[in-house]
Image (spheres, grey):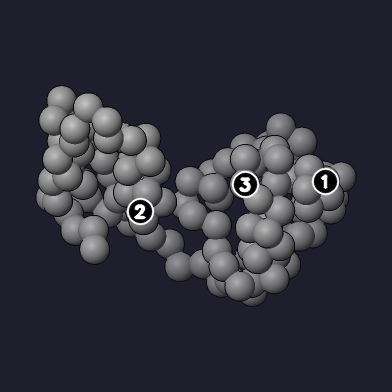
């Protein structure tokens, strides 16, 4: 379980990028030091209506002319992830929501 202030010791063969992605996906800030990764403060979360978000996401994706697979490729995620988001089974992480917004900004939707 991640908590603020948790210190994860790193070794030369540690996949630091994987740890950083995991910690950020959980909504925490990350500090990287020579021999450790330290979990920082949790980002302030906004309550999101999952059902409304999933409907809006599908509507915007279609309006931008993306299929599920092309949208997934643009985001760097699997098609199943996009399908789960649009069905309301899962929410994209904070960082994936930022990438989604960037893709829509480029497509002007």
The residue labelled by disc 1 is 66
Residue beneath the point at 55% across and 63% down: 91
Q: Circle 3 sits in a helix, a strand or a loop, which is it? A: loop
Query: Residue 106 sits in which quadrant?
Result: top right
Residue beneath the point at 21% across and 47% down: 39
Indicate which disc, 2 or 3, sits on the residue closer to the N terminus. Answer: 2
Task: Tell me the crowding category of disc 2: few under 14, some 14 to 19, or many 20 or more residues within 10 angstroms, Cα based.
Answer: some
Q: Circle 1 sits in a helix, a strand or a loop, which is it? A: loop
Indicate which disc, 1 or 2, sits on the residue closer to the N terminus. Answer: 2
The residue labelled by disc 2 is 27
Q: Seen in the image, is 9 located left or right of residue 87?
A: left
Between label 3 and label 1, give the one nearer the viewer. Answer: 3
Q: Seen in the image, is 6 located left or right of residue 55?
A: left
Q: Is residue 54 visible?
A: no
Query: Residue 75 sits in which quadrant?
Result: top right
* Cα–Cα span, label 1 and label 2: 28 Å
Task: Tell me the crowding category of disc 3: few under 14, some 14 to 19, or many 20 or more residues within 10 angstroms, Cα based.
Answer: few
Question: Considering only vertical position in the picture, is 19 above or below 55?
Answer: above
* Cα–Cα span, label 3 and label 1: 14 Å
Percent position (x, y) of residue 79? 71, 53
Percent position (x, y) of residue 23? 32, 49
* Image quadrant occupied by the N terminus: bottom left
Task: Please state which of residues 42 and 23 is positioned toward the viewer in this rendering.
Answer: 23
Q: How many marks?
A: 3
Task: Tell me the crowding category of disc 1: few under 14, some 14 to 19, or many 20 or more residues within 10 angstroms, Cα based.
Answer: some
Residue beneath the point at 68% across and 59% down: 80
The residue labelled by disc 3 is 77
Between label 2 and label 3, give the one nearer the viewer. Answer: 3
Q: Circle 2 sits in a helix, a strand or a loop, which is it? A: loop
Indicate which disc, 3 or 1, sits on the residue closer to the N terminus. Answer: 1
Residue beneath the point at 36% across and 56% down: 26
Percent position (x, y) of residue 27? 35, 53
């Amino acid at each position: 379980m991640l908590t603020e202030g948790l210190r994860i010791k790193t070794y030369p063969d540690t996949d630091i990028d994987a740890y950083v992605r995991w910690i950020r996906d959980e909504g925490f800030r990350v500090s990287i030091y020579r021999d450790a990764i330290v979990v920082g403060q949790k980002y302030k979360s906004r309550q999101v209506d999952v059902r409304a978000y999933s409907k809006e996401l599908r509507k915007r994706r279609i309006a931008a002319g993306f299929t599920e697979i092309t949208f997934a490729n643009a985001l760097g995620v699997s098609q199943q992830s996009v399908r789960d988001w649009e069905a309301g089974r899962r929410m994209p992480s904070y960082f994936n929501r930022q990438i989604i917004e960037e893709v829509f900004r480029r497509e002007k939707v």
